[in-house]
C-alpha cells in the first residue's frame, strides 16, 4: 500500500544535506460528491488530488513549502523553496523533527476496501432516495434544500531524516440532508446525517429522521425570553463544545499565553464528573489513527481527570519548548500546512448507564434544551473563556421538552460552564469531527431574548 | 496557461456525450506567508497549486471533475469524467458544438504588482511586534502574520467565452493578548487589499499593531456585556458584516431559487428602512472582494440590491441565472479549481447617509456602541443571524462609557433591517473571509456609523 508515495518521500529525504533535517509529507486522495435536489442530481463531482509538504530545518531554523503536485521537478522546486524559507526564520534551539520514541503504534483499521468498488450509480441512487424519502416523510416538510452523498479515500506517508517512516490511510463516507418545515411565512430548518468508513455502513433513515424531527419540532417557535437557566446541550452541540474546550488544552496555546488553562495544571478546573481523554487509538472514533502527523504513535492522553487538569497535549516543537516530550498529538490540515498540536478522539466519561437525553432533561427539570448553536467563531474565545452564542431549541418544563424557542443567545464563560456541569448522558455517539457526543447539562447560563 | 486549440478540443470532448454547456476553469496559484509569534519568526511558508476544473451542464444537472494535470491527456480525462452526467441522464446525443473562443475583456486594467520579499516581510513583522509590545507590559503575547497570494485564472466555455484574470492579494494582521487580574483579553487588527507588496508603501504596520494592542488592553477593564434588547450603534467601518449576514446571504439566488430564503418572492417590496441602500460591487478599486472577471468569466459589476429600503435584485451566477433566463450578475465564485462555482458576494456595503456620526451617539440615551465586529453566521431560511463584537462600549446618556467583554448579537434579518434609524457619513470598508458550503472567498464589507433601534445582545449581565 502507498508504496509509490513512500518511494517519492524516500527519494526527497535523500536530497537532504548532512547539516539539515528534512521531513516530507506526501498525500493523495480521491473524492466523490453528489448533491440531489427535487428528484434529480444537481451536481456530481469526482476528483483525485495529491501533493507534498516539505519542512527543512537548518541551524535551528525551519522553513516550509508545499505543492499540489507529485511531479518530481515540482517536488525538487518545493524542497529548494523550503530551504530558502528556513534562512529567514528566527533560530530556536527547540525547533526539531520528531525522532522515533519507542512507543509502538497500535494498528487502527480505518480503511474500507469496499468503498472503491461501489459504482457511482449506486451512490447517486442513495442520494436521490434520501431526498425523495425525506420529502415524503412528513407533510410539514416544505422543502428539501439538498441531500448530499460524499466519500473520500486518503493515503499519506511521512518520511524524515530522523528515521521516521509512517503511512496512514482512511476512507470515509457521508450522507446528509437539510430541510425546511412550515407553511405560509413560517420556516424552520433542520438537518440530519450519517457517517461511516464505507458505503454499507451509512444509515439513510437516521439522516432523514433526524432532519424531520429537528425541523418539525421547531414549528411555532417564538423568540425566547431572557433569564438565568439550566441548559441541556444536544449530543452534537456537546461534541462541538468539547472540541473547543480541548483546543485550550494545547501545549502550544498554553505556552504562548493564549489559553485560560495556563498555570492551572493540577487544579480542579471542572466538576468532578468530568474526565476528558483523547484516545486516537479508539477504533470507534471517526478520526482514529495509528500515527500522528509527525509519524509518532498515537496514544491515549488523559487531559482532565475527575475535574482535575492533569495534562496538556503536545507535538514535538511544543513539547520541546515546555521541556517535555510530544504526546503523539500532532495534527495537520493536509499537505499545505505544518503540524501543530491537536486532538483526534475526545471522549468524556459517560454518565450512569441508562441516562439518555430524556433522563438528563428530567434531572434538570426546568431550563432550555439546545439543538443548534451559531456564531461559535465570533462568540467563543479559548483565550479569555468568554462564551456567547446564538441558540435554538426547546424549553424544558417539569422535566420534559416543551415549546420551541429561537433567536436567543446563551452566555457564560467556558471556565464557569465546566465547573457547573450537572449531568452527563450515557448516550455516547461518535460523530464526525474530533469528539464523541453525549448529552451534557450545565446548571446555570444567561439566556437573552425578548 | 492552456492554448486555445487545446481548450476547444477539451470543450468538444466534454460535450461528446451530450449536454448543454461545458466550461474549463484553469488556475495557477502561489501563496507565501510568514508568521511571527511569541517573539520569533516561526514559519515562512510558500505554496503552489495549479490545475483545472471541467464542468458539464446537462439539463439541471452539473457534472464536475478536476485535475492537477494540465496536459491535453489530463484535461481530456477530466472532461470524460465530468461528462458522465450527460451520458447517464438519458437525454440522448444532443451535442452542442463549442464555438470559436473569443476573449472577454476585463474592465480592470492588470497592473504590475510588487512581489513579496522575504526579508522585507520579516522586517514588517518585527516592526509590528515591537510596536504592539511598546503599548505596555500587560501585552503578554503578539502574533503578526503577513501573506500574499497571486492567482491567475483562465475560463473558456462552450458559448465561445474566453476570459483571463490575475488577482494579487496581500494581507497583514496582528493579534495581541493582554493579561490582567481578571484574566486574558484579545485584540485584533487587519489590513487586506487586492494589491501586491506595494500595499505596505501606504500602510503603517505600527498603527495596526497599536490598534490591536490598545483593543486588548481596553478590554482588561471590560465588564460583562448586557443581555436583552438595546439600541446598538455600529461605528463606521466596524465591519459591515451586519448586512453581509442580515441580508447578503439571503439574497444569493441559489437560496432564492430553492425558496430557502426569507427574501424569496419579495422583489419590489419594502424589506428595510428607507435609509438602507445596499450595493454589492466587485469593481471597487483594490478592495478585498474585488476582481476583474468572476470565476465563470463574467466581468465584475456593481449591483444595487436594496434601493432606499426596496428590494431590487438578487445576486446571480451562471447556473441560477440560466434557470431564470437572465444574465449572471458577476457573482459566480469558487475557492479554487477544486470547487464548483456558486453565488457569492464581493464587496457588500450600505451607502452612506446624512447623519453626523457623533450626533448619532449623542442622541442615544442608553445602548451599546460597537467599534469593531468579528464574524457572524446566518440561517437564510429563517433569517436568524448572529454577529460578534470584538470591541464594544456602553452608551449612557448619549456618551460612550465603559468597555464591554465580547458577545454575540442576535437578530432576524428582515426585522433588523427595518430598525436602521440613522446612517452617518463616515463610510469605511473592512476585509473579511466568507465561508459557504465549505468554500472560503475574500469579501469586503462596508458601512458608515449607523444605529439599530433594538437588537438582542447576548451578554451575561442581567
Image (cartoon, coloured by chain):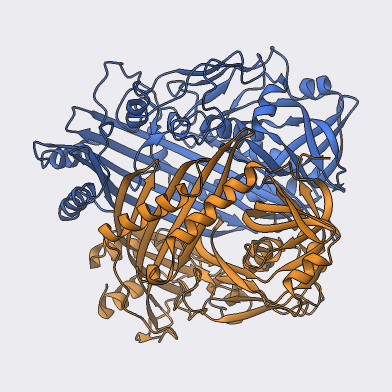
Chain colours: A blue, B orange
Residue at 73% across, 71% down: B357
- Please count the marks in the image: 0
Q: In the image as oriented, which residue stretches furthest toward the left?
A: A18
Name the side, left or right, on which B214 lies relative to A88: right
Residue B168 locus on image (x, y percent): 38, 69
Residue B153 locus on image (x, y percent): 36, 71
Residue B25: image quadrant is bottom left
Residue B230: image quadrant is bottom right
**Residue B29 visible in the displayed image:** yes
Residue A150 locus on image (x, y percent): 50, 46
Q: Is residue B394 above or below residue B102?
A: above
**Residue B264 visible in the displayed image:** no
Q: Is residue A304 above or below residue A203?
A: above
Name the side, left or right, on which A377 lies relative to A450: left
Residue B370: image quadrant is bottom right
Residue at 29% across, 54% down: B46
Judge by depth and name the residue closer to the eye, A75 or A88. A88
Judge by depth and name the residue closer to the eye, A341 or B66. A341
Q: Is residue A22 above or below residue A324?
A: below
The C terminus of chain B appears in which quarter of the rendering?
Answer: top right
Residue A307 locus on image (x, y percent): 61, 16
The N terminus of chain B appears in which quarter of the rendering?
Answer: bottom left
Judge by depth and name the residue closer to the eye, B258 or B90. B258
Name the side, left or right, on which A262 lies relative to A77: right
Judge by depth and name the residue closer to the eye, A212 or B225. B225
Amino acid at each position: 500500500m502507498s508504496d509509490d508515495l513512500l518511494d517519492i518521500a524516500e527519494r526527497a529525504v535523500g536530497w537532504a544535506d548532512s547539516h539539515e533535517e528534512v521531513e516530507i509529507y506526501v498525500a493523495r486522495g480521491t473524492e466523490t460528491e453528489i448533491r440531489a435536489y427535487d428528484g434529480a442530481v444537481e451536481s456530481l463531482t469526482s476528483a483525485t488530488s495529491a501533493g507534498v509538504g516539505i519542512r527543512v530545518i537548518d541551524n535551528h531554523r525551519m522553513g516550509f513549502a508545499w505543492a499540489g503536485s507529485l511531479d518530481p521537478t515540482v517536488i525538487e522546486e518545493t524542497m529548494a523553496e523550503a530551504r530558502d524559507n528556513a534562512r529567514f526564520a528566527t533560530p530556536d534551539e527547540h525547533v526539531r523533527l520528531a525522532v522515533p520514541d519507542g512507543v509502538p503504534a497500535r494498528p487502527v483499521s480505518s480503511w474500507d476496501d469496499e468503498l472503491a468498488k461501489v459504482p457511482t450509480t449506486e451512490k447517486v441512487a442513495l442520494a436521490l432516495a434520501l431526498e425523495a424519502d425525506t420529502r415524503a416523510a412528513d407533510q410539514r416538510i416544505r422543502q428539501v434544500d439538498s441531500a448530499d452523498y460524499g466519500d473520500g479515500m486518503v493515503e499519506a506517508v511521512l518520511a524524515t531524516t530522523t528515521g521516521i517512516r509512517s503511512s496512514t490511510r482512511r476512507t470515509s463516507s457521508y450522507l446528509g440532508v437539510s430541510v425546511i418545515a412550515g407553511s405560509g411565512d413560517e420556516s424552520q430548518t433542520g438537518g440530519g446525517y450519517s457517517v461511516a468508513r464505507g458505503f454499507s455502513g451509512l444509515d439513510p433513515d437516521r439522516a432523514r429522521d433526524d432532519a424531520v424531527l429537528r425541523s418539525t419540532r421547531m414549528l411555532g417557535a417564538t423568540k425566547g425570553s431572557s433569564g438565568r437557566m439550566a441548559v441541556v446541550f444536544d449530543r452534537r452541540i456537546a461534541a462541538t463544545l468539547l472540541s473547543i474546550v480541548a483546543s485550550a488544552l494545547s501545549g502550544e496555546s498554553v505556552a504562548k499565553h493564549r489559553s485560560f488553562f495556563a498555570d492551572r495544571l493540577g487544579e480542579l478546573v471542572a466538576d468532578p464528573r468530568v474526565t476528558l481523554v483523547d484516545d486516537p487509538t479508539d477504533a470507534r472514533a471517526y478520526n482514529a489513527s495509528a500515527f500522528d502527523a509527525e509519524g509518532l504513535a498515537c496514544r491515549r492522553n488523559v487531559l482532565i481527570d475527575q475535574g482535575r487538569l492533569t495534562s496538556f497535549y503536545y507535538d514535538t516543537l511544543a513539547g520541546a519548548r515546555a521541556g517535555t516530550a510530544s504526546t503523539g498529538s500532532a495534527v495537520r490540515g493536509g499537505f499545505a500546512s505544518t503540524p501543530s498540536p491537536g486532538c483526534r478522539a475526545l471522549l468524556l466519561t459517560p454518565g450512569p448507564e441508562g441516562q439518555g437525553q430524556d433522563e438528563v432533561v428530567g434531572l434538570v427539570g426546568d431550563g432550555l434544551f439546545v439543538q443548534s448553536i451559531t456564531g461559535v467563531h465570533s462568540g467563543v474565545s479559548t483565550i479569555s473563556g468568554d462564551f456567547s452564542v446564538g441558540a435554538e431549541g426547546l424549553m424544558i418544563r417539569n422535566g420534559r421538552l416543551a415549546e420551541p424557542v429561537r433567536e436567543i443567545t446563551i452566555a457564560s464563560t467556558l471556565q464557569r460552564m465546566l465547573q457547573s456541569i450537572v449531568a452527563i448522558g450515557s448516550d455516547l455517539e461518535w460523530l464526525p469531527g474530533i469528539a464523541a457526543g453525549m448529552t451534557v447539562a450545565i446548571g446555570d447560563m444567561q439566556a437573552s431574548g425578548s | 496557461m492552456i492554448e486555445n486549440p487545446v481548450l476547444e478540443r477539451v470543450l468538444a470532448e466534454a460535450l461528446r456525450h451530450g449536454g448543454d454547456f461545458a466550461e474549463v476553469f484553469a488556475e495557477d496559484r502561489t501563496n507565501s506567508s510568514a508568521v511571527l509569534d511569541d517573539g520569533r519568526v516561526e514559519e515562512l511558508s510558500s505554496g503552489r497549486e495549479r490545475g483545472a476544473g471541467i464542468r458539464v451542464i446537462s439539463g439541471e444537472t452539473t457534472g464536475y471533475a478536476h485535475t492537477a494535470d494540465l496536459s491535453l491527456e489530463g484535461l481530456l480525462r477530466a472532461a470524460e469524467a465530468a461528462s458522465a452526467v450527460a451520458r447517464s441522464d438519458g437525454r440522448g446525443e444532443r451535442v452542442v458544438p463549442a464555438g470559436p473562443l473569443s476573449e472577454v475583456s476585463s474592465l480592470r486594467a492588470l497592473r504590475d504588482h510588487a512581489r513579496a520579499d522575504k526579508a522585507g516581510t520579516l522586517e514588517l513583522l518585527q516592526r509590528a511586534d515591537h510596536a504592539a509590545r511598546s503599548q505596555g507590559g500587560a501585552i503578554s503575547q503578539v502574533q503578526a502574520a503577513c501573506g500574499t497570494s497571486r492567482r491567475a485564472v483562465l475560463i473558456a466555455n462552450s458559448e465561445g467565452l474566453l476570459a483571463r484574470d490575475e488577482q494579487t492579494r496581500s494581507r497583514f494582521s496582528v493579534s495581541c493578548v493582554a493579561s490582567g487580574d481578571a484574566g486574558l483579553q484579545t485584540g485584533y487588527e487587519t489590513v487586506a487589499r487586492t494589491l501586491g507588496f506595494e500595499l505596505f508603501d501606504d500602510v503603517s504596520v505600527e498603527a495596526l499593531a497599536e490598534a490591536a494592542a490598545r483593543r486588548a488592553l481596553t478590554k482588561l477593564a471590560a465588564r460583562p456585556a448586557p443581555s436583552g434588547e438595546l439600541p446598538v450603534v455600529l461605528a463606521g467601518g466596524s465591519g459591515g458584516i451586519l448586512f453581509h449576514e442580515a441580508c447578503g446571504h439571503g439574497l444569493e439566488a441559489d437560496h432564492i431559487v430553492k425558496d430557502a430564503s426569507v427574501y424569496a418572492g419579495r422583489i419590489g417590496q419594502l424589506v428595510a428602512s428607507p435609509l438602507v441602500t445596499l450595493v454589492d460591487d466587485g469593481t471597487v478599486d483594490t478592495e478585498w472582494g474585488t476582481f476583474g472577471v468572476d470565476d465563470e468569466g463574467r466581468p465584475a459589476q456593481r449591483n444595487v440590491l436594496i434601493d432606499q429600503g426596496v428590494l431590487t435584485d438578487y445576486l446571480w451566477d451562471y447556473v441560477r441565472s440560466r434557470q431564470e433566463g437572465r444574465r449572471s450578475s458577476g457573482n459566480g465564485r469558487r475557492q479554487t479549481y477544486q470547487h464548483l462555482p456558486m453565488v457569492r458576494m464581493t464587496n457588500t456595503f450600505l451607502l452612506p447617509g446624512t447623519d453626523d456620526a457623533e450626533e448619532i451617539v449623542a442622541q442615544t440615551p442608553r445602548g451599546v456602541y460597537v467599534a469593531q465586529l468579528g464574524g457572524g453566521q446566518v440561517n437564510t431560511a429563517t433569517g436568524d443571524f448572529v454577529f460578534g463584537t470584538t470591541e464594544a462600549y456602553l452608551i449612557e446618556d448619549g456618551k460612550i462609557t465603559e468597555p464591554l467583554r465580547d458577545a454575540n448579537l442576535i437578530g432576524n434579518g428582515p426585522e433588523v433591517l427595518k430598525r436602521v434609524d440613522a446612517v452617518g457619513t463616515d463610510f469605511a470598508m473592512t476585509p473579511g473571509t466568507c465561508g459557504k458550503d465549505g468554500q472560503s472567498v475574500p469579501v469586503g464589507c462596508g458601512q458608515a456609523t449607523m444605529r439599530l433601534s433594538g437588537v438582542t445582545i447576548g451578554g451575561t449581565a442581567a
